[in-house]
Amino acid sequence: MGQNHNGTVKIVWHGGDRFDIHMRQHIVRVDQIRDFGGGDTGPDPVELLAGSLAACAAQRAERYLHRCELPAGVTVTAHYELALRPARVNRIELVVEAPGVPTGLRDSFISAIEHSAVYNSLRMPPEIAFRLHVAEDLSASGQA
């Protein structure tokens, strides 16, 4: 089974606070809610963060259930709290609803979810680097 170890995601501006996230052949629109000056044409980036964590947990949970031959049909709800100074997500609570997980498997079920790539990335943050490319620099080097 091959695994995607590296990837590229490109963000393209569409006016105001609207951006499209291009991932492989998929596009997801992000925007701010109207209360914050956006058009609410898509989830905001914080909702995507919480949603990404919940989706990764749900996928791990379903794989666990399948491996243990238990009933499928996981639902994960993410509740999150924001904090200021610095602006950040302060807390995320995941509520996992899974049918038919026997008492004796519940700890290993939670452990399986806690080993998701998104959860691990939040617990052990990745190195983040910024590089600035300015349009004049690109055209001067013939890369316009």
Image (spheres, rainbow, N blue to C red):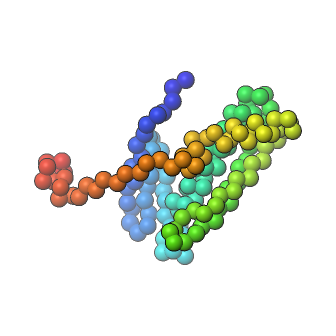
Residue for point 87% across, 38% down: 103
Report the side of 13 relative to 92 (left or right). Answer: left
Residue 115, picture quadrant: top right
Residue for point 41% across, 51% down: 128
Residue 110, picture quadrant: top right
Position above or below: 19 against 74 = below
Q: Nearer the viewer, residue 26 or 105?
A: 105
Residue for point 59% across, 67% down: 82
Report the side of 73 relative to 139 (left or right). Answer: right
Position above or below: 87 against 95 = below
* Quadrant that contains the N terminus: top right
Residue sitting at the far right: 103
Residue for point 54% across, 64% down: 88
Q: Residue 44, percent across and down?
A: 53, 62
Q: Nearer the viewer, residue 81 or 27?
A: 81
Report the side of 141 relative to 119 (left or right). Answer: left
Q: Residue 38, percent across and down?
A: 48, 71
**Residue 135 visible somewhere in the drawing:** yes
Q: Residue 40, percent across and down?
A: 53, 67
**Residue 59 visible somewhere in the drawing:** no
Q: Residue 113, percent across and down?
A: 68, 41
Residue sitting at the far front: 124
Residue 91, picture quadrant: bottom right
Count all numbered tags in the image, as a single digit: 0
